[in-house]
Image (cartoon, rainbow, N blue to C red):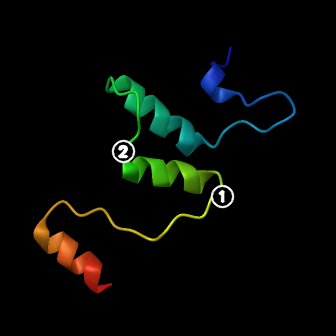
Amino acid sequence: MPSPADAGPPGRAAPPAEAVALVRAALAAGRTALNEWESKCLLAEYGVPVPDGALARSEAEAIAAAER
């Protein structure tokens, strides 16, 4: 039997698999909210336009992302 996260409201398609995976991963980690990067990915899965961005984990990555 599918879980509620796998099924959309009656008459609507199920949520994209990547969206379900994002939410499940956050819940499994004990979080009740997505971070900014995850939120943008979730919105994009539903076709909502999001600004371009890059995840930078160091100063060098931030500089490289800013130069693109």
Pick out the residue farthest to the top: 1
Which residue is under mark 2? 35
Q: Position of residue 65 (x, y in %)?
A: 28, 76
Rendering coords of residue 64 (x, y %)? 22, 79
Residue 66 is drawn in which quadrant?
bottom left
Circle 2 Cα neighbour tier, 10 Å, few/some/many (<14 / 14–19 / ≥20): few
For badge 2, the amino acid type reads Asn
The mark that comes first in sequence, 1 or 2, is 2
Cα–Cα gap, marks 1 and 2: 19 Å
- Residue at 32 percent across and 27 percent down: it is 29
Residue furthest toward the bottom? Answer: 67
- Closer to us: mark 1 or mark 2? 2
| Secondary structure state at the residue bearing disc 2 | loop
Give me the residue at 72% from left, 36% from top: 14
Instruction: Look at the numbered disc 1 and give the secondary structure of its residue.
Output: loop
* Type of amino acid at the residue the image marks with label 1: Gly
Left or right of residue 49: residue 21: left
Q: Is residue 13 above or below residue 67?
A: above
Q: Is residue 25 left or right of residue 14?
A: left
**Residue at image mark 1:** 47
Image quadrant of residue 9? top right
Is label 1 in contact with label 2 (beta carbons under 8 Å)?
Answer: no
Residue 3, percent from left and from top: 63, 18
- Of residue 31 and residue 24, the one placed in the foreground of this image is 31
Vertical relation: 2 (above or below) 59: above
**Nearer to the camera, 49 or 8:** 49
| Placement of 65 over or under 25, stated as above or below | below
Task: Give the residue displayed 30% in from the left and 62% down from the top.
Answer: 55
* Label 1 Cα crowd, 10 Å radius (few <14 / some 14-19 / many 20+): few
Q: Provide residue 44's location: percent of width, then percent of height.
A: 57, 57
Q: Which residue is drawn at 68% across and 14% down?
A: 1
